[in-house]
Image (tube, rainbow, N blue to C red):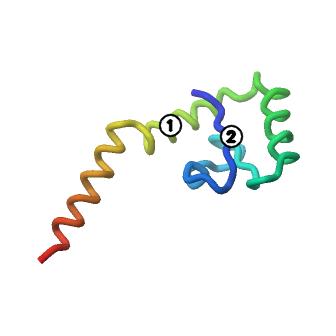
């Protein structure tokens, strides 16, 4: 239940809705990164909903169980696609 901050050039950014379950800044833009961090620090007492949404995203996309499911799905498609 941490606040995620990532650049728009990471794979993780695909899962982040800025301001809803984390924060995304333009890659290479230190000023925007500083703004995001400043906002988080200044509003840390109001981040509980965002933290909960971040954890939900983690559970849906990043747990080992989800990783296992994704890998098995890929292998299944590869094996099933061969004839």
Q: Is residue 32 above or below residue 63?
A: below
Residue that carries the numbered disc 2 in the rendered image: 5
Q: Say which element carries label 2.
A: strand
Residue 73 in picture, x, y percent from top left: 27, 56
- What is the quadrant of residue 46 in the picture? top right
Percent from the top left, x then y, of residue 14?
A: 57, 55
- Residue depicted at x 16% and y 68%: 80
Q: Quadrant of the N terminus?
A: top right
Asked if residue 75 lies left or right of residue 3, the reply is left
- Mark 1 or 2, nearer chain start: 2
- Say if 51 sits above or below 22 in the image: above
**Residue 4: where, in percent of width, then height?**
64, 37
**Residue 65 horizontal/vertical position (percent):** 32, 38
Question: Residue visible at 67% across and 45% down?
Answer: 6
- Outermost residue, bottom direction? 83
* Quadrant that contains the C terminus: bottom left
For residue 56, the mark is 1
The residue closer to the viewer here, 20 or 63, is 63
- Looking at the rendered structure, the secondary structure element under dot 1 is helix
How packed mark 1 is, by other alpha carbons closer than 10 Å (few <14, some 14-19, many 20 or more), is some
| Label 1 close to label 2 by CB (< 8 Å) | no
Query: Mark 1 against mark 2, which lies toward the viewer?
Result: 2
Q: CA distance from mark 1 to mark 2?
A: 16 Å
Q: Residue furthest front?
A: 28
Residue at horizontal 64 percent and vertical 50 percent from the top: 17
Q: Is residue 74 left or right of residue 12?
A: left
In the displayed structure, would residue 66 be above or below residue 81? above
């Amino acid at each position: 239940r941490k606040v995620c901050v990532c650049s728009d050039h990471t794979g993780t950014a695909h899962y982040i809705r800025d301001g809803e379950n984390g924060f995304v800044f333009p890659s290479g833009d230190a000023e925007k990164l500083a703004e995001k961090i400043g906002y988080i620090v200044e509003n840390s007492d109001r981040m509980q909903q965002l933290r909960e949404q971040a954890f939900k995203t983690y559970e849906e996309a990043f747990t080992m169980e989800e990783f296992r499911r994704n890998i098995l799905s890929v292998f299944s498609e590869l094996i099933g696609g061969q004839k």
